[in-house]
Amino acid sequence: MNYPQSRLRRLRYNKIVREMFEDINILPKDLIYPIFVCEGENIKNKIGSLDGQYQISIDNVIKLCEKLIDLNINKILLFGVVKEKDETGDISCNSESIIPKAVKEIKKRFGNKLLIIADVCNCSYTTHGHCGTIKNNDVDNDLTNKTLAKQSLILASSGVDIIAPSDMMDGRVKSIREILDKNGFEKIPIFPYSIKYSSSFYGPFRDAVNSDFAGGKRETHQMNFKNSFEFIREIEQDLNEGADAVIIKPALSYLDIISKVKSKFNVPIIAYNVSGEYSMVKSSAKNNHINEMEVIIEIMCSMKRAGADSMITYHAIQIAEFLKNNNV
């Protein structure tokens, strides 16, 4: 049936009718909040390039988690911020390093009220800021995997719920799965950043973790955004090695990839609304160019509509407060 018998606007005139046919909604359960955990006590350092976000010590992490639970946000992603670093990132493979300590304290206080996801990478812990061990002026894949596996085992022993390797080394999921299974942690899922593009949207994040990135390129391990089909092999490889869900990063410029992954693999997908995407919204809102909350909700809906099951976002608290204040 065509116009004038068919008038699609009939279903748009009335707000209640519009809402009746909505199939995309954002709820606190869809959100994962990233937390930057630093050493010390009573620390809350503002991250200059990431407006409204902070590096916080473990005691303040506990206070933040209380707020998150009150807002019905029950998933967090932890990143370590440390002063002491080494060449390989092995400093993270210690039960007294910052993230294992944070995991223990959060679990002691909140038990299973919060799902703790730990980012597993070396860039925050290396003096050069690369994602692994440097050999012959490049990140050595297999040596790095050994460090990632050790880091994951320490985190599992500390009580973490999910391991999320973000390094983009070949075979990292296999290395991590093997060491976890060998040590009795076969029930701990692995959510790798299966698709992580070499992107300019990460700039504010590197400030957030005090990454001492010494130059060079990450294109040798992160994906080329000018390649349309490489994502297929990356997803297949991670799933074959034991990935339980996949993280796609960045999200907003890669909605086509999220959609294709969902259609081809029907695997659980977490979209990472990265620091540069967040900062663009904040900057535009500060200059009164946009309605901030309307744009945030639109962005989150676009990710979910593309196929994301959950979103990692720095907007999580804002969204949850908005939903609570509006009785959603």
Image (tube, rainbow, N blue to C red):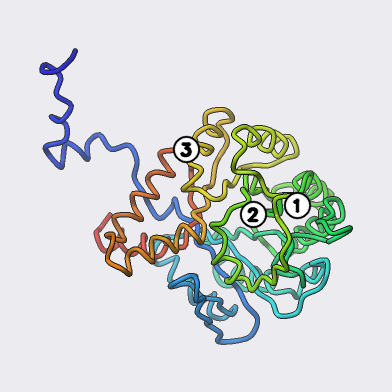
Circles 2 and 3 in contact, beta carbons < 8 Å: no
Amino acid type indicated by mark 3: Gly
Write the residue at 77% across / 62% down. 151
Viewer-proximal residue among 263 and 132: 132
Classify residue 314 as left or right of residue 219: left
Circles 3 and 1 in contact, beta carbons < 8 Å: no
Q: Quadrant of residue 155?
A: bottom right
Label total for image: 3
Q: Which residue is mark 3?
A: 307
Q: Quadrant of residue 96?
A: bottom right
Write the residue at 45% across / 60% down. 278
User: On residue 283, which mark appears?
Assistant: none
Classify residue 85 as left or right of residue 72: right
Q: In the figure, 306 relative to 147: above or below?
A: above
Q: Nearer the viewer, mark 2 or mark 3?
A: 3
Q: Residue placed farthest to the top in the image?
A: 1
Q: Which residue is mark 1?
A: 185
Viewer-proximal residue among 5 and 214: 214
Image x and y of residue 50, in percent: 48, 70
User: On residue 162, which mark appears?
Assistant: 2
Image x and y of residue 124, in percent: 69, 68
